[in-house]
Amino acid sequence: MAPTRARVRRRGAATPYLFLTPYLLLFLVFALLPVVLGVWLSLHQWDFQLPNKPFVGVDNYRDLFDSNSVVYSFWWESLGATGIFTLLSVPLLVVLPLGLAVLLNRAFPGRTFFRAVFFAPYVLGVAVIGLLWRFLLDANLGLVNRLLGLVGLPDDTAWVTDLPWAWISLVGVTVWWTAGFNAVIYLAGLQDIPGELYEAAKVDGATAWQRFRHVTLPGLRPVLLFVVTTTILASANLFGQSYLITQGAPGTSTRSVVWYIVEQGIAQNDAGRAAAMSITLTLMLAVVSVANFRIFRYRED
Amino acid sequence: MALRRIGLYTALVLLTAVFTVPLVWMVLTSLKSYPDAQRIPSTWLPDPIETYGYEQLLQAGSQNPVLRWFANSMLAAVAQAALVLTTASMAAYALARMRFRGRGLIFGLIVATLFVPPATQIIPNFLIVDTLGWLDTLAVIVVPGAASAFGVFFLRQFFLSLPRELEEAATLDGADTWQIFTRIVLPLSKPALATLAVLAFLTNWNDFLWPIFVLFSGDQLTLPAGLGLLQGAYQTDYPVVMAGAVLASVPAIVLFVLAQRHIIAGVSRSGLKG
Amino acid sequence: MNSEERPKDNLISRRRVLGLGVGLGTAAALTLAGCGGDDDTPAASGDGGKTYTGPKVDLNLWNGFTGGDGDIFKKLVDQFNTEHQNIKVGVATYRWEDYYAKLPGAVSSGNGPDIAVMHMDQLATFAARQIIQPLDDVASALELTEADFAATVWNGGIYKDKRYGIPLDMHPLGFYYRTDLMEQAGLDPAKPPTNRQEFEAALTALKAKNIQGFWMSPFQFTGGMAGYSLVHQFGGSLFNRDTTQAVYNSPEAVEAVTWCVDLVKNGHSPANVGQDADYVAFKAGKSAFNWNGIWQINDLKKSPDVKWGVAPLPQIGSKQAAWANSHNFTIVQQKRGADANKTAAAKVFINWLSEHSLDWAAGGQVPARKEVRDSSGFQQLTEVGKLAPELDYAAFPPALPGVGDVITTFYTAFNEAVLGKKDPKKAMDDGVAKANQLLADNAKKYGA
C-alpha cells in the first residue's frame, strides 16, 4: 500500500493522494457509506425482516419536531439529558486532565507509577465501570454513602435515583473513567513544545503561571482544539454509563439521546426513525463543533 | 524546593486514592466467594481468599472458551491498532503538510464523520459487512473500526504543531516526501504515535456493542462480548465479573506502561532540534 | 402486508439506493433482507415431530440461558444428541437483551439459528417481523392441546390465529421470606402471610423490631413486576381486552401502585432502593420479604447461610394474580428457504425436550407441560413446586407485536411513582398517554 520512493518522486502531484489512498478506502466504505445508507434508511420505515418497508419521505424527521408525534417528548427529553451531561462534563474533562498532565510531565521519582494510576480506570470497559459504580453508589447499601457517613456527612444521598445527584454521579464517574485519556493526549502534546521556549522564558524571569499561560497554552493550541472537540463528542455519545448506572432513573430523565436512538433502531425495530434521529443529532453536533473550530482558528491566526 | 516537592506528593497521593479505591475494590472482590461478595455492609478484604471468580472464568470444558475470546480480542485489537497507525499517519501527514486540490473538502468530510455517533451506525454498517461477506469473521471486528476519523484528526493536529524547520532542511538535502515522512516526521511523532496506539488498542479491546451484533459463533466472540455470558440473567455475580475485569485490564495496563516511555520523548527530542 | 406489493417495493428501494450512488452489493443486501423467507410456508414434512428418519442434519439452537441455567440446558441437549444419531443440535448462548437485538440481523443475513428459544411476550413481535414461522402442525401432530398445558401459557403462543411457540416452562413471580427475621418479629415462619391483612400485620411486627420488611424497588426487576402483579390483583389490567388501549391508570391500578408507594411512606421500605438492592438486602437479612422471580430459588440455594422460604404471592387485592413469563421454542425462518429435513428434525427436538422438561425444572422453572408437572419427579422439587399453583392465575403479557416498549411505559411510570417524583395517579396518566401513542404507532407499523 505504501507509495514507494520512486513513485513519490516521479509523480509529485500524486503524492498527497497516494498518502491518502489507504485511509480513504477505509473511510469511504466504513465511514461515509454508512452515513449515505443512513440517509436512505431515514426516508423509510425500515426493519430487517418486516415485509413492508414503505418509503415515508421526511416523516421520520418531521416527527422529531411535531409535538403530537409518538417520539417527540422522548426525543427532546433524551436530547436534553445528553445536553446537561455534556455541559457539566466537558469543562471538567478539559481542565482537570490538563492540570494532571502538567503535573505528570515533570521529572520526579515514581512518575511512571502515577501515570499508570491515572490512566488505569480508562482501560476498563464501560460494562465493568457501570456495574462497579452502581454497586458503590447504591443509596442504601453502597460504599460511597457508608464512607460519607463515617466522616460525619449525610449518608442517605440518592446518588443514582434522584436529581441532581444522578447527574453528579454520571459526571463524576465519567471524569474518573476518562480523565486519564485526555491527560495522556495532553502529555503527548506537551512533548512537542520545545524546551528552549521554557528556558528562554525563565531567563526573562517569567513565573510558573506566566510560563504556563504564554508558553504551554499556545503550544498546546492544536491539541487543545482536538481535546475540546473529541470531549464534546464523547460526552454527546453518553450511553453505557447512564444505561448501566442510573438506568434512566428517575423515570427517563437520565436516558441519553444515543441510548434512545440505539433503542429505537435495535430494540424497537425502527431503523428508519433511528437513522433520522442519528442524522439530526449529527447535524446539531456539527453546528456546535464548527463554532468551536471557529473560536480556535480565530485564535490560531 | 523540598516544601514544593512535599506538596506535589501530597496532591498526587490524594488523587491516587480517589482513582484507585474503586480499582482496589474490584481486585479484592474478584478474590471473594459468591456469598462473601454479597455481605452487607460489604467488607473490604476477602474472607477467606477464594479463587471462585477465576475458576468460573477459566474452568476447563465449560461452554465458555474464555482464553479463546482473550486471544481473539488481542489479535483484533493489535491488528486494528496497526491498521489505524499506518493509514491514519499517512493521511494525516498529507493533510497537515501538503497542498493539493480538495484538501479542505477531504479533511472537512473526515472531521464531519466524527460527529456521527458510532453506536447509531450499527445497522448501516451491518448491511455493508454483510454484503462483503464478513459477518462472523475476524475482519469484521478489525477493519470497519479502523475507518474512524479520530486517528487522522489526532495525528494531523500533532503534525501541525511539529516545527517545520527540520523537514525544510531535509528537503534542501534532497530527501523526498516519503523519506521525510518515515525518517523525520514519524520518529519525531513517537509520543503521538504511542498514544494513538494505546487508544486505538483500547477502543477495540473494550468495544462490545458491535462484536455482539456481528459475531455469531461462540468461538469467534471477543472478551467483553463473551464475559457477559458468564453470569446468570438475573443476578450480578460480582466475583466473576470482577475477575473478568482484572483479566481484561492486565494486558491493557502492561501495554500502557510499555508505551508511556515513548509518550514522554524526553531529552532525545530536544537534541534533534539543536 | 400485501404480498403482491412486496417485489415492487423492493425494486423501488433498489433504484433509490442506486440513485444515491451506493454500490450494487449493498442494494442487493437490502433487497434480500426485504424478502428473507417471506413466502416459505412451513414444510409440513414428516409427522410433525414424532420421529425423524432422514439423513443426518446439524441444527443450530440459540438461547439466552447464561449462567447455571445454560449448563442444565446443555446437558439436556447432549442427552438428546446421544439418543438421536441422525440429529446433532449445537447450542449458542447470548444474554437475552443481546440475543433479541442480534437475531433479526442474523436471520436476514442467513446466519440465524434453526431453533430459537424466546420469551412469550416476544413471540408476536418476532412473528410479525417474519423471523419465526408458524408451527401449528407440530402441535397437531404431537396432539398437544390446551389440556396439556395451562391455558394462559398455551394461548400466549398464538399470534393472528397461528401458533408460533411451544411452551417449555413458565416462570412466575414468587414470594420469598426470611424465616429467621420472621421469628425475630414473633411471626410463624411456617405460615407466611397469604393475604393483605396478614401481610400488613407482618410488616408492622417487623417494623416494631426495626426491620424494614419489604424493600420496594422502583425498577422493573423486581418492584415493577410486583406492581404489575398487584394491578391485576386489584382487578385492573395494563391493557383493555383487545389491547388497543392502555388502562393502567384505572382506579384499581392506581390503588395498586399507591399501595407500593405507601410501603416507602410507612417505613416498610427505605426510599431510593437501587437496582438489585432489594434482593441483595434480602439475602443479607436486611429485608424480610422479597417478591422475585422463581429463578432465584437456585441462587438462594448457593448461600447456605440464608434462611428462607418461598410461597405464592399473597393476595393483596381482590383476587389472586402474579406476573409470569414463559420460555417457548420457535422455528426460525431461513433466508435460503426452509430445509424440510431440518424443519422435521427441529420438531423432533422440540417435542423431545418438552417431554423431558422435568430436568429443566431443576433449573428453577415450572414445566409448561401438565404431564410433567403432575409427575412424582416434579412433586419432589419442593420449592419450585410451591409456585406451580400460580400457573392458574398467572398474568402473562399480551401477544402484541412491539409490546415491549409499551409495557416499558408502565415500568417508567411505576419508577416515577415509587421514587416520589410524581403522584401515582399523575404518573400512571402520563404513562398511559405515552402507551396509547405507542400502541397506535405499532398498529400502523405491524399492520395489526
Image (spheres, coloured by chain):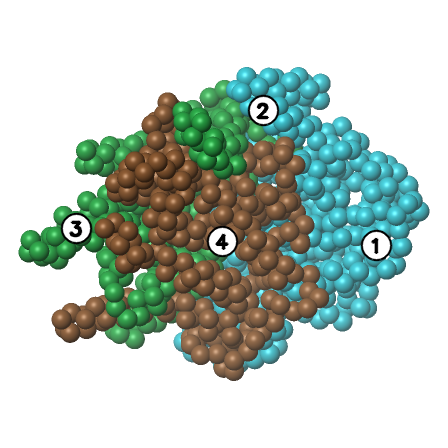
Chain colours: A green, B brown, C cyan
Q: What's the residue type where badge 1 is placed?
A: Trp
What separation in Å lies between label 2 and label 3 (alpha carbons)?
53 Å
Q: Amino acid at mark 3?
A: Leu
Tell me the number on the disc at residue B206. Answer: 4
Disc number at residue A252?
none
Label 1 SS: helix
Q: Are marks 4 and 1 on the same chain?
A: no
Mark 4 residue element: helix
Of all chains, the one bearing label 3 is: A
Mark 2 vs mark 1, CA separation in Å: 47 Å
Residue at 41% x, 67% y: name it.
Answer: B23
State the residue at coordinates (71%, 22%). C3
Count of marks placed on residues: 4
Tell me the kind of residue under disc 2: Gly
Q: Which residue is mark 3?
A: A197
Q: Are marks 3 and 4 on the same chain?
A: no
Q: Residues within 10 Å of mark 1 (few under 14, many from 20)?
A: some
Q: Position of residue C425 (x, y in %)?
A: 41, 46
